[in-house]
Amino acid sequence: MNHFSFIHISYLLQAALWTIALSLIAFVGGGLFGFIIALLRTSRSTALRRLASGYIQIVQGIPLLVVLFIAYFGLSIAGFKLSALVAAAISFTIYCAAFLGEIWRGCIEAVPKTQWEASECLGFNRFEQLQKVILPQAARIAVPPTVGFMVQIVKNTSLASIIGFVDLSRAGQIINNSTFQPFTVFGVVALIYFCICYPLSSLSKSLERKLNVGHR
Amino acid sequence: MNYTFDFNSVLAAWPRLLEGAWLTIELSAVSILFGFILGTLCAIGRNSHVGLLKWFIGAYVEAIRNTPLLVQVFLVYFGLASIGMKLAADVAAVIALVLNIGAYTTEIMRAGINSIHRGQIEAAECLGMSKGHVYWHVVLLPAVERVFPALTSQFILLMLASSITSQISTEELTATANIVQSETFRSFEVYLVVAVAYLVLSFLFRAGFWFIGQFVFTRKRKLGTNI
């Protein structure tokens, strides 16, 4: 029997790079799309607000795993042959956009209403208001919860392993299939995830504390 | 793209899908119940003055919150089996889910307990209430009431996350969908139907928790004010 050794650990670390890469793709894709959702969600048009909130409610009511299955198995049978990476990137973009959109909506709404009014008095149009007054302040509020959500993204990329993407979890399963030492293998896998996520969680917590300094 | 949707073969499998959905509900309900108890106990422990206990609970919460549920499920199912504790897939799923939701509940409940104003406790002590009474009526119950919306969201996320247990052959909704799609090759339709089923489930859970809230927290119903 094959024993768990340093070769396996280096394989796991390599796979961890794919986990990080997929997380970055998810964050960038979800961030861009989520930003649009957040803007729609806070727009003045009722129809656009409803559209964005409907999108958020639908995506937040479906498990990410099912979204992945629809993108990977569903679309491929419907004629689009997607690789696991592309299917995962699409699913994570859809999923992260809903959550980031909702988080950032809260941040935009947290900017006091008087800022809108004051900038309107200065003759700014809606776009200038957002660009020069509201978004810079909202961005400051948004940093801690966004970093916190990155932890969720990293953890959720483990689901991409189920559609065959070789990330950290999949690598763990592959090694476990040859070594039959699930405790050690998945323990190390969990430890690597922890090493990626814990600094992010701590960062989010300390940023939050720093930002809240005025309210204490 | 010319793809014709055919939901007939999928809808023909509705009794099995319904069974799967029922197992999802059962798994989630049991996990939420025990996870809530575990989380509340851990929150109480974390607010205590026993250093070792606090550190231990802190480590548990951080370990769970910074690792994926999928890996936790694998550790419980394959890990425990490798040391001789062979568990049924359902049991392993429940254990993993309870451990998972317990950690999140700990953090939420801790926030709730910390939000109780010191003056409330002092006032209760002045009224001559015993320590246990103060903790139960003045600290714990109002704390649950305050964080109930956050708990509800977290519990619904758990219900959705229970789809992950399909990977250890727990035959809940997602696993049933996998079986149906491998028989009918109608994966697009199957997963669309299942997505709608999960939407309905999350709506049902939200409604259920709203009713529980109305039933348990009578203050809002009677006085019309939030805590």
Image: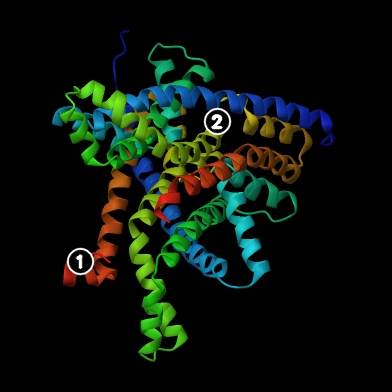
The mark closer to the camera, 1 or 2, is 1
Residue A120 seen in this snapshot: yes
Between the C-alphas of marks 1 and 2, the distance is 47 Å
Say what secondary structure mark 1 lies in: loop
Residue at the limit of the structure toward the front, as seen here: A122
Q: Which mark is residue A9?
A: none
Quadrant for residue B109, please give it: bottom left
Coordinates of residue B40 in the picture (x, y in percent): 48, 66
B118 relative to A204, above or below: below
Residue beneath the point at 45% across and 65% down: B114
Which chain letter goes with mark 1? B
Determine which residue is flagged by label 1. Answer: B225
Coordinates of residue A73 in the picture (x, y in percent): 45, 22
Quadrant for residue B111, please give it: bottom left
Residue beneath the point at 24% across and 33% down: A42
Quadrant for residue A141, please give it: top left
Residue beneath the point at 55% across and 37% down: A155
A137 relative to B53, above or below: above
B24 relative to B132, above or below: above
**Pick the front one: B180 or A102:** A102
Amino acid type assigned to the residue bearing label 2 in the image: Ile
Dot 1 crowding, Cα within 10 Å, few <14, some 14–19, many 20+: few
Amino acid type assigned to the residue bearing label 1 in the image: Thr
Q: Which mark is residue A162?
A: 2
Dot 2 crowding, Cα within 10 Å, few <14, some 14–19, many 20+: some
